[in-house]
Amino acid sequence: MELNNLQPAKGSVKSVKRIGRGQGSGKGGTATRGHKGQKSRSGYSKKIGFEGGQMPLQRRVPKFGFTNINRKEYKGINLDKLQQLVDDGKITDTVNMEVLIANGLTSKNDMVKILGRGELTAKLDITVHKFTATAKAAIEKAGGKAETI
């Protein structure tokens, strides 16, 4: 350690210049705020989205659309996914919410709808919230039952 490489401990020296603390500080007087105007005053804060009096973007852009607060969201599961689980030996003859949750296809609070993509060859008794018409027909064609909760 030499005198030419001494440094203060990390965090002990503030790098921020203190402004508005008298003329001797070099940043006194107007305290870097300039002369007069709204921004020079104490307590000034610009509102979010303020554009200098021009009509703000969020008020210029039109609003459209509608969100139905009573909408029900369904988690869709296709027939080919069920057939794949049968082929893998994960499900046998009965499919209900507990089986779907155990296989990671849905969570306990989801509402499930069986969709008609793919082929179903296994005979399954499926009990979920909803079915599409093609899915229900395919399940019954394979010899299974489609029951709604």
Image (tube, grey):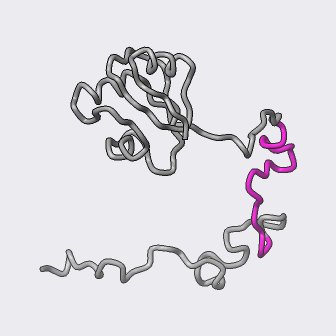
Q: For the point 43% across and 25% down, which residue is it?
A: 78
**Residue 2 image point, x, y percent:** 14, 79
Left or right placement of residue 15 versus residue 33 in this view: left
The quarter in which the N terminus is drawn is: bottom left
**Residue 15 image point, x, y percent:** 45, 74
Helix, strand or loop for the magenta stretch, by majority = loop
Please tell me how many numbered marks the rendered image carries.
0
Looking at this rendering, what residue extends furthest in the left direction?
1
Q: In the picture shown, does residue 126 fall above or below 12?
A: above
Q: In the picture shown, does residue 2 fall above or below 32?
A: below
Q: Which quadrant of the view contains residue 26? A: bottom right
Q: In the picture shown, does residue 92 fall above or below 28?
A: above
Q: For the point 26% across and 78% down, which residue is it?
A: 7
Span shown in magenta: 41-60
Left or right placement of residue 23 versus residue 50 in this view: left
Q: Which quadrant of the view contains residue 86? A: top left
Q: For the point 44% across and 78% down, which residue is it?
A: 14
Q: For the point 51% across and 33% down, which residue is it?
A: 147
The answer to if 49 sits in the magenta stretch is: yes
